[in-house]
Amino acid sequence: MGAGGNGAGAARVAVVTSGPGAAQDADLPLIVAGLRDAGLAAEAVHWDAEHVRWDRFDLALIRSTWDYAGRLEEFLAWADATARVTRLCNPAPVVRWNSDKRYLLDLAARGVPVVPTRFVEPGGPWAEEDLGAGRPVVVKPSVSAGARDTARYEPGQLADAARHVRMLREQGRTAMVQPYLRLVAEGERALVFLGGTFSHAIRKGPLLTEAGVVDNARVAHPGAAPYRPSEAELAVARAAVAAVPGPEGPLFARVDLALDEGREPVVMELELIEPNLFLGMNPRGLDRLVAAVAGAGEAVAGGATA
Ligand SMILES: Nc1ncnc2c1ncn2[C@@H]1O[C@H](COP(=O)(O)OP(=O)(O)O)[C@@H](O)[C@H]1O
Ligand SMILES: [Mg+2]
């Protein structure tokens, strides 16, 4: 254990996790140890644990709250309440904005290339023909993580795709319909930004390997391996991060890109809540995150005791 554990004045950091996160998050122990080595008093805390005094912490770093999508209102209420008594990273309004993939519309409006997406609201108009004939599509909910309730359909499976949209609507959820980007077969890219600058990237294999199948037990990042992004990919990812609303840039961000038919990178997902950061493959990324947290946490701790 590092020196910071109980040093007076050391910034106190909650690294926020969950039941599923604590069991599976490979970044979590690295981050806690890295922060302690840097002299901060860091501990892992479950977001939904009872009787946590969040005001004990100078900073709460959301890390692996991997059960939030099924408990969204509870989670957003926690984020708002926590942000009132400590510094929450990323900030609560950013968490709220990023919890629903309708943020893709905001990115598109700011000129960021995104996967072309039709959002089907639970109460809104909708016809099976809207799926578009003759092309493979992906159907997924606008609030989700880990490819839950997500599937792709071949042109011969449009009735199944329509049933999937109907099911989401009947559950009161907004459905998304996108073209299936076949070039994910060459890998999706995930570009990690820490403290506002690009840190590292990975490439991973496609998830929706079988058409017409919803599988909620998928491996989220099959075959993840270090990757050097192209200039075009970096430019799109930077534009996505720059489009995040709010006065300050996100402390951490992951931009997931795929290539469209013309091999141009498009944003599939911008992860600002609890992304895997692949720090085990990227020790310098861990150093960057620790430096960013230390800077933010010490600013708060210093301010509080001055
Ligand atoms: N339009 C698409 N084309 C190809 N693959 C997709 C598409 N949308 C989703 N996928 C696959 O499903 C996975 C999960 O979808 P994603 O949009 O990242 O949502 P989440 O990770 O929040 O569940 C992606 O990593 C990708 O493998
Ligand atoms: Mg994803």
Image (tube, rainbow, N blue to C red):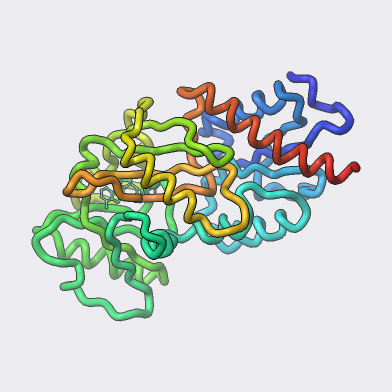
Residue under the image location 37 percent in, 35 percent down:
221
Residue under the image location 57 percent in, 47 percent down:
250
One can see residue 189 in this view: yes
Q: In this view, does 75 lie to the left or right of 143?
A: right
Residue under the image location 27 percent in, 62 percent down:
177
Q: Nearer the viewer, residue 275 or 23?
A: 275
Q: Which of 9 and 168 is in front in this view?
A: 9
Task: Note whether 9 is above or below 120 in the view shown.
Answer: above
Image quarter where the N terminus lies is top right
Q: Which of 153 and 253 is in front in this view?
A: 253
Determine the image quadrant of residue 292. Answer: top right
Residue under the image location 35 percent in, 28 percent down:
227
On the image, the x and y values in percent for residue 303 come to: 84, 45
Q: Is residue 56 left or right of residue 251?
A: right
Image quarter where the C terminus lies is top right
Q: Which of 169 and 31 is in front in this view?
A: 31
Q: How many marks?
A: 0
Q: In this view, does 156 lie to the left or right of 139?
A: left
One can see residue 18 in this view: no
On the image, the x and y values in percent for residue 124 come to: 34, 79
On the image, the x and y values in percent for residue 81 come to: 71, 59
On the image, the x and y values in percent for residue 119 come to: 33, 68
Task: Note whether 160 is above or below 5 in the view shown.
Answer: below
Determine the image quadrant of residue 190. Answer: top left
